[in-house]
Image (cartoon, rainbow, N blue to C red):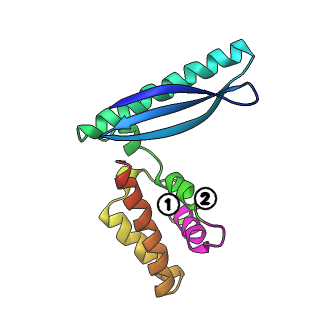
Amino acid sequence: MTVKLRKRKLASGDVSLYLDIYQSGKRGYEFLGLYLTKDKMASKETLKLAQNIQAKRQLEIQHSEHGFVPHFKKKANFVDYFERIAQGKPRDDTAWKNTLKHLQTFSSRRIQFSAVTDDWLETFKTYLVTKVSQNTAHTYFSKIKAALRQAVKEKI
């Protein structure tokens, strides 16, 4: 398992930074959206940031390989995570957007992953049934389950 910081020269002359992640026989890339430019001071700071991200990813992978969930992932906000997933869905998929609105209202825009328990899910399901029809509540709750399955895949 390795996480290497790589550079790629762009046509503009800038250099794009990305991570080359090799884990369990699979290679993946994470483009950081960070660029080195002709401004040496800014580039130096950008490179430090990229190296910090690299170290963080290395720790995340090591923790997940040994079955540990990093503390910061348990403390992460599920509503923010759900919002990121919803933004990646097609614009015409209103179920994700509406589920997000109800989730934000129900949880006051903040709930840690560690607080998402069976009891919390049952309470949220009951809340949905009181606000929308039963079929709509089922659809919205399925979006919550999909986000939680994704979080499990990401070892959160």
**Position in image of residue 147 (x %, y %):** 44, 61
Whether the magenta-drawn stretch holds residue 156 is answered as no
Residue range (magenta): 90-104
Residue 26 lies in quadrant: top left
| Any part of residue 109 in sight | no
Q: Does the magenta stretch include residue 96?
A: yes
Give the residue pinned by disc 1: 107
Q: Which x, y percent locates residue 63?
A: 30, 35
Foreground pick, 83 / 47: 47
Judging by the rendered image, the residue that carries numbered circle 2 is 87
Q: Residue furthest front?
A: 11
Which residue does the image show at 46% across and 54% down from the upper left? 78
Query: Residue lying farthest top?
Result: 40
Provide the major secondary structure of the magenta segment.
Answer: helix
Nearest to the observer: residue 43 or residue 99: 43
In this picture, residue 38 sits left or right of residue 32: right
- For residue 45, the mark is none
Q: x%, y% of residue 6?
A: 52, 26
Does 137 appear above or below 152?
below
